[in-house]
Image: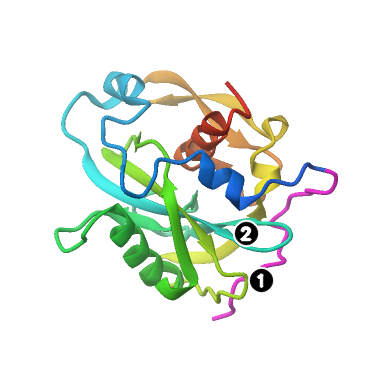
């Protein structure tokens, strides 16, 4: 299986955008010793869609590859999966009973999905919890990824691993909203229309949360 190319452009053109440092991201996060707790910051909107039943805890890893141009790691799920087929996501999944915390869960899932060696990761902190249409309350773990870390998708679930410049993702000019119908209700979702594959939905909302915490957008 071919390793992810850290220089892959993933269909975006970051030239001319203001550079953003990983240290600046770290300053906007919940610290590792003070993890956030549910409900998610979008709880009110999800209650209207799926009710107020308890959400299952989950964690994802927003890994930012270190370097002159920091890049964020994403996975593209296979087209034939029963849930979220063909969608872009961060590596992660349900927090299991054997996981010490959200960091442990995110690192375990990242090893399983993209072959990430935990030794190549420095956890930095957390974004706010986010609830999903599938009934999860997700804790996003943000981490610094070693510049030379090798990644390889687990072929049973992940079609590919790709990376997008952090500066592109944190530029509100690249972010748009569109209306969709979910369970008979009209709602608006965030997306990065210039990204290929398309980054949208819950994954884009986590980046919106980062931008808000950094003061990049309201």
Assess disc 2: are there few (<14), some (14-19) or many (≥20) residues with their C-alpha within 10 Å of its C-alpha.
Answer: many
Image quadrant where one finds the N terminus: bottom right
**For residue 4: magenta?**
yes
Question: Which numbered disc, 1 or 2, marks the residue that appears first in the sequence?
Answer: 1
Image quadrant where one finds the C terminus: top right
**Residues at marks 1 and 2, CA–CA distance in whole angstroms:** 8 Å
Q: Quadrant of residue 136?
A: top left
Residue at screen point 58% across, 25% down:
178
Q: Please tell me the numbered disc located at residue 163.
A: 2
Say what secondary structure mark 2 lies in: strand
* Residue 156 in sight: no
- Residue placed most toward the observer, 212 or 42: 212
Q: Position of residue 168 (x, y in %)?
A: 70, 44
> Height in image: 44 above or below 107?
above
Residue at screen point 26% across, 36% down:
37
Q: Position of residue 163 (x, y in %)?
A: 62, 59
> Height in image: 131 above or below 90?
above
- Residue placed most toward the observer, 140 or 10: 140
Say what secondary structure mark 1 lies in: loop
Q: From which residue to which does the magenta span run?
A: 1-16
Circles 1, 2 touching at the beta carbon (< 8 Å): yes
Residue at screen point 59% across, 28% down:
215
**For residue 118: magenta?**
no
Q: Which residue is denoted by mark 1 in the rendering?
A: 5
The answer to whether residue 184 is left or right of residue 153 is: left
Q: Please tell me the numbered disc located at residue 134.
A: none
Assess disc 1: are there few (<14), some (14-19) or many (≥20) residues with their C-alpha within 10 Å of its C-alpha.
Answer: some
* Residue 95 in sight: yes
Residue at far right of view: 16
Look at the magenta stretch and give its main secondary structure. Answer: loop
What's the colour scheme? Answer: rainbow
> Height in image: 60 above or below 183?
below
């Amino acid at each position: 299986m071919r390793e992810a190319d850290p220089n892959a452009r993933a269909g975006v053109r970051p030239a001319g955008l203001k550079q953003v440092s990983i240290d600046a991201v770290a300053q906007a996060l919940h610290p590792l010793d003070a993890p956030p707790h549910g409900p998610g910051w979008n709880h009110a909107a999800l209650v209207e869609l799926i009710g107020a039943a308890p959400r299952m805890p989950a964690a994802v890893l927003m890994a930012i590859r270190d370097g002159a141009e920091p890049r964020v790691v994403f996975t593209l799920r296979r087209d034939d999966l029963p849930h979220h087929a063909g969608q872009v996501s961060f590596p992660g999944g349900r927090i299991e009973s054997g996981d010490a915390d959200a960091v442990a869960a995110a690192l375990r899932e990242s090893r399983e999905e993209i072959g990430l060696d935990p030794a190549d990761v420095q956890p930095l902190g957390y974004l706010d919890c986010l609830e999903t249409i599938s009934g999860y309350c997700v804790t996003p773990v943000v981490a610094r990824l070693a510049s030379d870390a090798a990644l390889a998708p687990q072929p049973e679930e992940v079609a590919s691993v790709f990376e997008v410049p952090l500066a592109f993702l944190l530029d509100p000019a690249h972010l748009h909203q569109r209306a969709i119908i979910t369970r008979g209700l009209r709602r608006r979702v965030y997306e990065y229309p210039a990204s290929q594959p398309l980054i949208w939905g819950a994954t884009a909302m986590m980046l919106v949360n980062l931008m808000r915490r950094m003061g990049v957008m309201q």
